[in-house]
Amino acid sequence: MTRVLSAWLPVVAWAALVFTLSSIPDLGTGLGGWDLALRKVAHAAEYAVLGALLLRAVGRELPAAAIGNWRPLLERFAEDHARVYLRPNPDANAELRRVAAAGTRVGAFTDAPEPLARVAAAHLGVGRRLDALEAGPGALDRLLTTLGPEARVVRSLDAF
C-alpha cells in the first residue's frame, strides 16, 4: 500500500494543482506581449511534469534523450508561435537604423529565458541590429557592463 501511495500521490497532487491553476480565470504575469507566450510554455511544462509523474507511477523510466532535448523544443515552439504575437514595428526599426548609422551601440535586455529572447528579437526584426542581448535575472546589469558606463537605458520608443 505504501508503495502504491508513494507512486500515485504525486500524480494526484500535481493534477490537483493543474486543476486549481486552470480554474483561475485571469491568471496572468503582467508582462504584456510575453504574457501569452509564457503562459503557453508554462502550460506545456505543467503537462510534461504530469506525464513524467505518470510514467514514474506506472514504473517506467524517462528516456534521457527526451529530457535533454527540452531547450531546442522550447525554441521551436517559440519560433512557431512568435509570429502570432510579435510583429515588427516600422517606427522602432527606423529609429534603430538611425541610431546604428550614428555609430551608437544598441543592446536589449529581458527577464525572459535567453532562447525566447533571441527568437523574439529575430521576429521583431531587431536581432541583427543589436550589439548585445542579455536575458534572465540580472540582464540589465550585465547589459550595462557590456555597453559601458556611458550607456543610456531607453525603455520605450517615446523616450528617444
Image: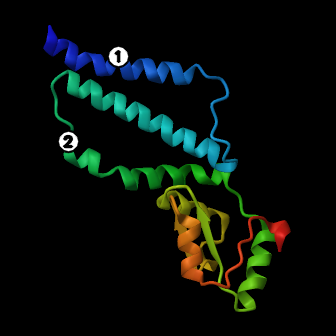
Residue that appears at 45% across and 22% down: 17
Q: Is 24 displayed left or right of 155 in the figure?
A: left
Does residue 133 appear in this view? no
Numbered disc 2: secondary structure: loop
Q: Nearer the viewer, mark 2 or mark 1?
A: 1
Image label count: 2
Bin the neighbour count of mark 1 within 10 Å (Cα to Cα): few under 14, some 14-19, many 20 and up: some
Q: Tell me if residue 62 comes above or below residue 73 in the rendering.
A: above
Q: Does label 2 or label 1 sit earlier along the sequence?
A: 1
Residue appearing at x 79%, y 77% in the figure:
95
Quadrant position of the N terminus in the picture: top left
Residue 159, position in %: x, y?
A: 83, 70
Pinpoint residue 134: horizontal percent, then vertical percent.
53, 68
Q: Say which element carries label 1.
A: helix
Spatial CA span between label 2 and label 1:
22 Å
Q: Quadrant of residue 30?
A: top right
Residue at 59% x, 76% y: name it.
Answer: 144
Q: Is residue 48 visible?
A: yes
In the figure, 140 relative to 146: above or below?
above
Dot 2 corresponds to which residue? 63
Give the label on residue 12, or none.
1
Q: Which residue is most to the top? A: 1
Q: Position of residue 9 (x, y in %)?
A: 28, 16
